[in-house]
Image (spheres, grey):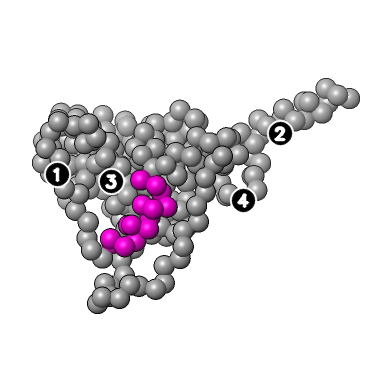
């Protein structure tokens, strides 16, 4: 079964999917293709638990019920720094939506510009 | 003399393709270490950037759910996005773009699917901004 994940690191989020029985190492290879960082220099965390390379995603608690297409599971990625140590897992939070007005529409939205290629 | 001009033009084209020369308007966001998965016209992944500089990397096939992104990425080569596979949305904040990306995955997963399709939950606070983004993105 496919499972869907968001892999986050600081200001980057990668949306990807994989099979439940994919190994963590395989996932790191996918990330290597995108981010050009070798798997040895990557660390993946799920809920602050480090994911070991030999385990499968299912072993780490990612199943088709916890990691769905419209509710992907969140994993945190860290790179190895130049000094050889891994950076601390850090994720920059997203922006917050404005408060809901009572009944009135908010008035500050700008009109989106449309670009259409001819 | 003629071949001199041709050679220069050829060089310019190569340099531009390699991103050494910046084209007018759009800025090249990443430096040299380009994302292998995001390179070239057949890249698997594309990068979407929100107004607050969050980067969202999604599969190209998913991003093409949006008509606007499809046009940006596969229109005639004048769009810089076509080359770098990167699109910047100066008006879409990250919390909205995140929901947009989740919607792409949801749509691709459940289109023409015989399994039961779950509801796509939208927090009311985000709904209005999401609606505007969806209108802009044509999806």
Q: Chain of mark 1?
A: B
Quadrant of residue A108 within the rendered picture: bottom left
Residue behind mark 3 = B103
- Mark 3, Cα crowd under 10 Å, few <14 / some 14-19 / many 20+, is many
Q: Is A98 colored magenta in this rendering?
A: no
- The residue where tag 1 is placed is B118
Spatial distance from mark 3 to mark 1, Cα to Cα?
12 Å
The kind of secondary structure the magenta stretch mainly shows is helix
State the mark number for residue B12: 2
- Indicate whether residue B127 is drawn in magenta: yes
Q: Which residue is mark 4?
A: B25
Up the image or down, B43 lies above or below B88; here it is above
Magenta residues, start to end: B126-139
Q: Chain of mark 2?
A: B
Dot 2: element? helix
A17 relative to A36 in the view: left or right: left
Q: Chain of mark 4?
A: B
Foreground of the two, A89 or A100: A100
Where disc 1 sits, the SS reads loop
Query: What residue is at 60 percent from the left and 39 percent from the top?
Result: B78
Whole-percent x and y of residue B115?
12, 33
Number of other residues with Cα within 10 Å of mark 4, as a class: few under 14, some 14 to 19, many 20 or more: few
Q: In terms of secondary structure, where does tag 4 sit? A: loop
């Amino acid at each position: 079964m496919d499972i869907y994940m968001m892999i986050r690191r600081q200001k980057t989020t990668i949306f990807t999917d994989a099979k439940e029985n994919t190994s963590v190492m395989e996932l790191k290879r996918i990330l290597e293709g995108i981010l050009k960082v070798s798997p040895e220099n990557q660390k993946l965390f799920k809920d602050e638990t480090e994911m070991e390379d030999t385990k499968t995603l299912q072993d780490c608690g990612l199943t088709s019920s916890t990691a769905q297409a419209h509710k992907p599971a969140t994993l945190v990625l860290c790179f190895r720094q130049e000094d050889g140590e891994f950076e601390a897992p850090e994720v920059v939070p997203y922006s917050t939506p404005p408060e809901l007005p009572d009944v009135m529409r908010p008035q500050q939205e700008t009109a989106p510009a449309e670009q259409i290629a001819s | 003399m003629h071949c001199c001009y041709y050679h220069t033009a050829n060089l310019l084209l190569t340099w531009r393709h390699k991103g050494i020369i910046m084209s007018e308007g759009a800025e090249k966001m990443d430096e040299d270490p380009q994302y292998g998965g995001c390179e070239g016209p057949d890249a698997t992944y594309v990068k979407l950037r929100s107004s607050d500089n969050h980067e969202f990397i999604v599969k190209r096939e998913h991003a093409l759910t949006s008509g606007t992104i499809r046009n940006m990425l596969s229109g005639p080569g004048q769009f810089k996005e076509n080359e770098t596979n990167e699109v910047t949305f100066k008006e879409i904040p990250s919390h909205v773009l995140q929901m947009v990306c989740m919607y792409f995955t949801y749509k691709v997963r459940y289109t023409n699917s015989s399994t039961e399709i779950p509801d796509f939950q939208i927090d009311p606070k985000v709904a209005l901004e999401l609606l505007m983004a969806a209108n802009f993105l044509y999806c």
